[in-house]
Image (cartoon, grey):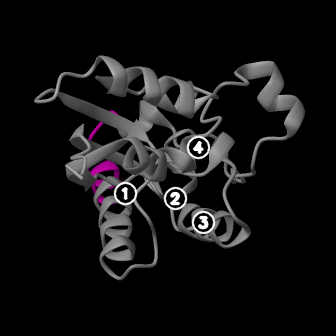
Amino acid sequence: MFVGSLHHVENLNAMLGKVRDVLTPDGKLLYNEYVGPCYISFPDDRVALINRALRSVPAEFKISPDAQWSNPTLEQIQQTDPSESVRSALIPQFLRLYFDVEWERGFGGGLLHPLFQLLNKDRLAVLDAGAKAVISMLIGLEELLEEQGLLPSDFVLGVAGQKVRDAG
């Protein structure tokens, strides 16, 4: 089982190979993982989308009135956690190389995950009408963008089993 840990693994081949080797023929691998861009470094169009959404949030709900997302620098990555999402974007394809994915569902985060760290959590925790409106608007926007195919889900929950091998 991987719960928010596989995206910290640099050598996915070695890790998934070992899991495959110890998984019984009828065993299941469960995973709940971040599979968004490596190092949480988004492409320019996603950064623009995140910042456009953030501009629609009233200042009192942000960590600062001019808060905006910027991708981490190499120095920031090295200082905070060099393993954070080191190969995250490769996880879906690597899982399929080693296992038969039997069930998988994305559960968002393409917009909300980066936005969350730019929001004033204390103000949102009040849960008054204003806070509820901001939360509902952001959730609704992420859902709409995903439904329209304009935003990928950066988190997945799934179940995989051993690959069925040909008898011949």
Residue 37 or residue 94, whichever sits in front: 94
The residue carrying mark 4 is: 118
Amino acid type at mark 2: Pro
Q: Are marks 1 and 2 in contact (CB under 8 Å)?
A: yes
Q: Are marks 3 and 2 in contact (CB under 8 Å)?
A: no
Q: Which badge, 1 or 3, is on the more N-terminal residue? A: 3
- Residue 67 colored in magenta in the image: no
Q: Secondary structure at mark 2?
A: loop
The residue carrying mark 1 is: 134
- Magenta span: 125-134
Q: Which badge, 1 or 4, is on the more N-terminal residue? A: 4
Q: Nearer the viewer, mark 2 or mark 4?
A: 4
Q: Secondary structure at mark 3?
A: helix
Residue appearing at x 69%, y 64% in the figure: 43
The residue carrying mark 2 is: 58
Amino acid type at mark 1: Val
Residue appearing at x 60%, y 66% in the figure: 55
Q: Real-space Cα distance between discs 3 and 2?
A: 8 Å
